[in-house]
Image (cartoon, grey):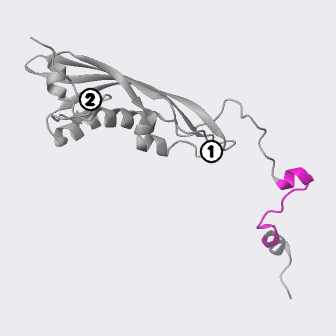
Amino acid sequence: MPARTVDPRRLDVAAFAADGATLEGRFPIRTLERLCETVDPEAPPVEGDVTWRVQGELVPVAGGPSQTWLRLDASAQVALTCQRCLAPVRVPLDVHRRILFVAGEDAAAQLDAEREEDVLALSRALDLRELVEDELLLAEPLVPVHDVCPEPLPLHDADLDGEAEEHPFAALASLKRRPPPS
């Protein structure tokens, strides 16, 4: 029997898992619009590819139907804004996920709250590119920073003058210390 052709933009997850199939490929980063929106605007234009691999499997469950799983691995490198120096910082993104697919959004929401693994509703046409992009976005660090910033951090003007900055409530404190008028 000839192997099924698999379209990563319309992946039939149940059939893919039943076949125990594996699929791998590349997506140009520039085609992942939401990921490109997170790139530092001062970084060079977005180039390169996201490499990905997905493997389907059915896992037998005692006394019940088999579970449908996908194992997803993806990697890319993007330039985000360093939160220390505000310059672009290259950040590697690596995703290694196991995703359980169940019938219906309600079952997925309930199980997702209970399980450590990701749980999604089973559909007949999963857009693998969107799933990869979602997982890469979730893998971005909350606070990207250089290990060592390329330029020294700018000092505050008061630090340069050697003068201490006056606290905004200092005047109120001096009023509080004065004796009341007679």
Is 65 displayed left or right of 53 in the figure? left
Q: Quadrant of the N terminus?
A: top left
Q: Residues within 10 Å of mark 1 (few under 14, many from 20)?
A: few
Task: List x then y, in percent, for residue 90.
Answer: 59, 32
Query: Does residue 69 lie above or below 85 as drawn?
Result: above
In the rendering, which numbered label is found on residue 135? none
Q: Give the range drawn in magenta.
A: 157-172
Q: Quadrant of the C terminus?
A: bottom right
Can residue 165 be found in the magenta stretch? Answer: yes
Report which residue position mark 2 lands on. 8
Can residue 131 be found in the magenta stretch? Answer: no
- At label 2, the amino acid type is Pro
Camera sees residue 61: yes
The residue nearer to you, when weighing 110 against 15, is 15
The residue nearer to you, when weighing 50 against 62, is 50
Which quadrant of the view contains residue 103? Answer: top left
- Of the numbered discs 1 and 2, the one sitting upstream in the chain is 2
Looking at the image, which residue is at 52% across and 37% down?
46
Report which residue position mark 1 lands on. 42
SS for callout 2? loop
Is 47 displayed left or right of 181 in the figure? left
Looking at the image, which residue is at 76% across and 37% down?
151
Which quadrant of the view contains residue 54? Answer: top left
Which quadrant of the view contains residue 125? Answer: top left
Is 7 displayed left or right of 176 in the figure? left
The residue nearer to you, when weighing 113 against 43, is 43
Task: List x then y, in percent, for residue 155.
Answer: 81, 48
SS for callout 1? loop
